[in-house]
Image (cartoon, rainbow, N blue to C red):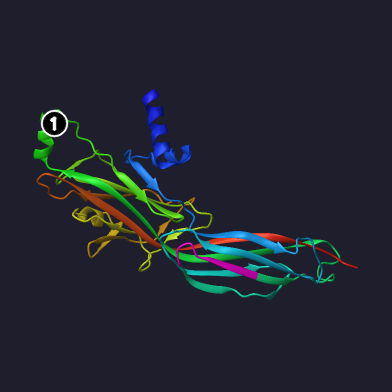
Amino acid sequence: MRKIILTLILIMFICGCTIPDVLKQMMPGFEQQEVKELPPDIITVQSLNILPTPPINTEDEFSVSFILKNQDDTNEVGQVKYNLFDSGLCDRAAGDDKALGTLVPLQEEFVEWTFRAPTNDQIAQISTKCPIRFKVDYNFDARSQIDVNVISQSRLTELQRAGEGVTFTPTLTVGRGPVKIYLSFGASLPVKSGNKLPLYILVEDKGDGLYSLIPDEEGKRLVIEAPGFDATECVKDGKFTRSDSRLVSDGAIPLIRKKTVQLRCSLTAPAESFEKTYYITASLNYDYTITEETEVAVNPTG
């Protein structure tokens, strides 16, 4: 029991996860591994501000402003746009919805809208609130990579005769952004040349927005690249189709409670005369929406 607890603590320390995250990943087929995971934040809304400070009198003007920021210091974020979709009884007097296009790393954009509070008649001489609700859309790529060691039977036998332990701990690197792709193996490593290697895949939305479906749409499907491995059985299982040297998800995949079911794909390890490290990569291009809101109190006058 003490060993199990220590193992859990070690995994938590390595991946920076909370206990529920660790237990979630410990499903059948999950192999203990080092996890390097970048934060989920990418496009954020900062410094949301209302001037003058509410409450606002009827028919007065006020402004709502905020900053959109690309938090990534390496990658551009494409197709960024913002849109006001609800302001209650307050009418927008100035400021438009806008498509910003691409935000370069760490770029900030200041946004400001001006509103006019409703009349006394519109609020029936009763204090009310105007909900200011808007959404931000953008496009990004989820990327993950895991390494795997392939060893020949002769090399394995040599090491075992020498009394050396033959183990390999894979490292999973999960890229930045709210949509995460987790990869794990259902067999001990290293894998012997020519043997089957079950690969498990889980996609999860860890952001503040909502991504509910991996669509069956060109350019938006889940892609797995496993150079050197034979993926014939993955195609036979019906979950993936082959596109050049890549495996592409076949059919729409829903996210239930912000995650997919665990997908399984059986690979066959390449022929190796000695031993070699290979890399398996997963990617997913996705459109993401976050929503923000604030309330502005309005008091009657006269």
In the picture of the structure, the residue carrying the numbered disc 1 is: 160
- Give the position of the C terminus as an image quadrant: bottom right
Residue lying furthest right: 302
Residue drawn 80% across the image and 72% down it: 59
Question: Relative to 266, is 298 on the left or the right?
Answer: right
Per the rendered image, the range of residues in magenta is 104-112
Label 1 crowd bin: few (<14), some (14–19), many (20+), radius 10 Å: few
- In the image, is residue 148 part of the stretch drawn in magenta? no
x and y, in percent, of residue 58 in the image: 82, 69
Write down the quadrant of residue 112 in the picture: bottom right
Question: Relative to 133, is 164 on the left or the right?
Answer: left
Residue drawn 72% across the image and 71% down it: 115
Q: Nearer the viewer, residue 91 or 264?
A: 91
Question: Relative to 270, is 7 on the left or the right?
Answer: right
Write down the quadrant of residue 49 in the picture: bottom right
Viewer can see residue 183: no
x and y, in percent, of residue 257 in the image: 49, 50
Viewer can see residue 196: yes
x and y, in percent, of residue 114 in the image: 69, 72
- In the image, is residue 109 part of the stretch drawn in magenta? yes
Residue drawn 38% across the image and 46% down it: 36
x and y, in percent, of residue 4 in the image: 38, 28
Write down the quadrant of residue 72 in the picture: bottom left
For the residue marked with disc 1, what is the amino acid?
A: Gln
